[in-house]
Image (cartoon, rainbow, N blue to C red):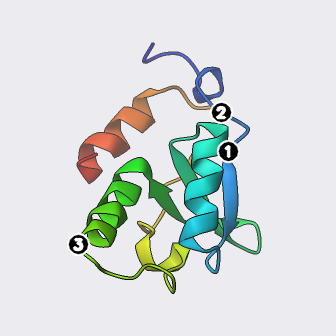
Amino acid sequence: MIDQPISDFMNRGVLQGDERTSIGELVSSMHSTKQSAFIVCDEGVPVGIVSERDTVAILEKALGGESLSDLSAADIMAAPVHTLSESPCMGPVVQILTETGF
């Protein structure tokens, strides 16, 4: 596995939108497409990511009575996004995940 190219594991059908995407739209898109992440882009360039963990954190806030109506992807995204080309092997991916504590 560590010697396989990243392209063997990639999902090319990722969800994406811009920083103004509402939380409602973002969560609805993730749910309806069964995707675990939403890539936040600025003019097509990834600038952040919203994961299922992030959506659980906002659900906790909502259950605590906090209003989420004004929140957008920019408010909850993790940044920066680490990207790699699809040709390297999985080794660099494992290294980045280890270094960033994912």
Callout in the foreground (3, 2): 3
Label 1–label 2 contact, CB within 8 A: yes
Q: Which residue is mark 1?
A: 14
Looking at the figure, which quarter contains the C terminus? top left
Q: Looking at the image, can residue 88 be seen?
A: yes
Q: Residue furthest right?
A: 43
Q: Is residue 36 above or below residue 81?
A: above
- Nearest to the observer: residue 24 or residue 10: 24
Helix, strand or loop under label 3: loop
Neighbor class of circle 2 (other Cα within 10 Å; few <14, some 14-19, many 20+) is few
Q: Amino acid at mark 1?
A: Val
Q: Looking at the image, can residue 85 be seen?
A: no
Question: Which residue is found at the position 65% from the left and 52% from the top?
Answer: 29
Looking at the figure, which quarter contains the N terminus? top left
Report x, y in % for residue 24: 57, 67
- Identify the mark nearer the N-term, 3 or 2: 2
Compute the Cα span from label 3 to label 1: 31 Å
Question: Which residue is found at the position 33% from the left and 38% from the top?
Answer: 95
Q: Which residue is mark 2?
A: 11
Q: Which residue is mark 3?
A: 64
Neighbor class of circle 3 (other Cα within 10 Å; few <14, some 14-19, many 20+) is few
Helix, strand or loop under label 1: loop
